[in-house]
Image (spheres, grey):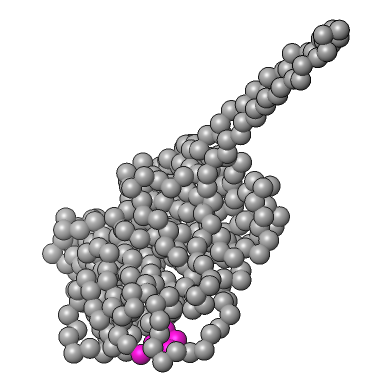
Amino acid sequence: MRRSLLALAAALSFGSVLAACGGGGGSSPLPASASPSPTAAPTATPAPSPTPASQTSTVPVSAAATTAPIPSVAGFSGSVSLPNASGSTTITATSTTTAPSGTPALQSLTRYTAPQASSSETVYLYESFTAAATVTFNGIPGFTLTLPSSINTGGQTFYVALLVPGTTQWALAAEGPARVSGQTITFAEQSGSSVTLTAGQTYWFAFYSVPMSSITPTPSPTPTATPAGSQINLSPSSLSVQTYQTVTFTTSEGGYSGAFTAKVNNSSCYVWATNGTNSTGGSSATAADGVFSLVAADSTGCTISVSDANNNVATLTVMVVAAPLGVQPVSLSLTGTGASNMQAFAITGGSAPYTVSGYDTSVISVNTDASSSTVYDVTPLKAGQTSITVRDSTGAPKTISVSVTTVSGVIQ
């Protein structure tokens, strides 16, 4: 996901407003000779109804890109832009102004060296997505959020944090910074990565802001040893990887010369010190030079927490994306006819469902192999030439050229 599925979450929070009015009064004694003037009975001012702190609606998902509203709550309204999807389903979306029960608090995004400075985000809205069926989006959803007029957007930088099911820490700045226009903040839809929502799992997004002044704090003299509160820098700040693709990320920290430790939040990823003596992957690794390698074993993705010796922590979000559609082999040369001369090809990468079409049915027949839904058997029927077109859910095509010859090698 860009600063980049997710942070991309991000993985999106705030409180309800209650108001009430009341009054009272007294009187002084009147002289005995005076008659009191009649006083109108006070009119009771009704207290406003509490604003709901949570609202839920259903967002339809189709194969085509679409924009749908998210539930309005406490003066907040908006929409989500969903990229092309692998199929049709529905998403139960909930907007709430309070931190969801059981979720961790957002950790501080900015670390300060100045002791008099404070560090905290202002969270405006939490948004949850729960898909009825597993669905993969060909890109990272975007959001548009209109804030109540009581919120001053000046001097603020807006981001989206993401909490993936099974993780214990928010992935901060999974999307952002946002484009701000008046009271509307926009996080653009991002292409180039795919995001999968697993059926029945709840993904939380948190919309929050950080004061612009806190992003570039006043520098202080570089200490000989980095004190607690310094910022760990990750490069890259997030990762989109393919399954079993080995990638490298580096950590650094101004004024700090010690080792870093990387811990994975679940068993989907393995991490190790790239230049260490032990190259075996695991859930935790320590690198003296701050250089780590990782590999994702499945499509779940993970969050990696990187810490220094002073307990400063930075978070790296790892999203698993589908490899580009491919076929192996890209051409077939068949000699003779019949099942005994059958050959096979396999589909690699891409995103299901797949379609196989375009070939001359008088020259070959194509059927799914019993061993796998991505392996196809090609049986020659007569001498000739044709081609097979393979497409995935995005419509991207791959072509396999097929040549069938007689035993003598002459094409009829």
Residue depicted at 45% across the width and 86% down the height: 254
Q: Which residues are magenta?
A: 253-257
Q: Nearer the viewer, residue 183 or 34?
A: 34
Q: Nearer the viewer, residue 76 or 268?
A: 76
Residue depicted at 57% across the width and 76% down the height: 216
Q: Looking at the rendering, in which quadrant would you find the C terminus?
A: bottom left
Residue 229: give x, y in percent of width and height: 43, 75
Does residue 410 show up? no
Asked where in the image residue 194 lies, by quadrant, the reply is: bottom left
Residue depicted at 41% across the width and 92% down the height: 224
Residue 237: give x, y in percent of width and height: 44, 74
Residue 259: give x, y in percent of width and height: 30, 85
> Does the magenta stretch mainly form a helix, a strand or a loop?
loop
Above or below — where is 188 with respect to 310?
A: above
Asked where in the image residue 31 lies, by quadrant, the reply is: top right
Residue depicted at 52% across the width and 34% down the height: 52
Residue 370: give x, y in percent of width and height: 16, 55
Q: Answer whether residue 241 is magenta in the image.
A: no
Does residue 19 show up? yes
Residue 362 appears left or right of 143:
left
Give the residue furthest to the left.
Answer: 340
Asked where in the image residue 274 lies, by quadrant, the reply is: bottom left
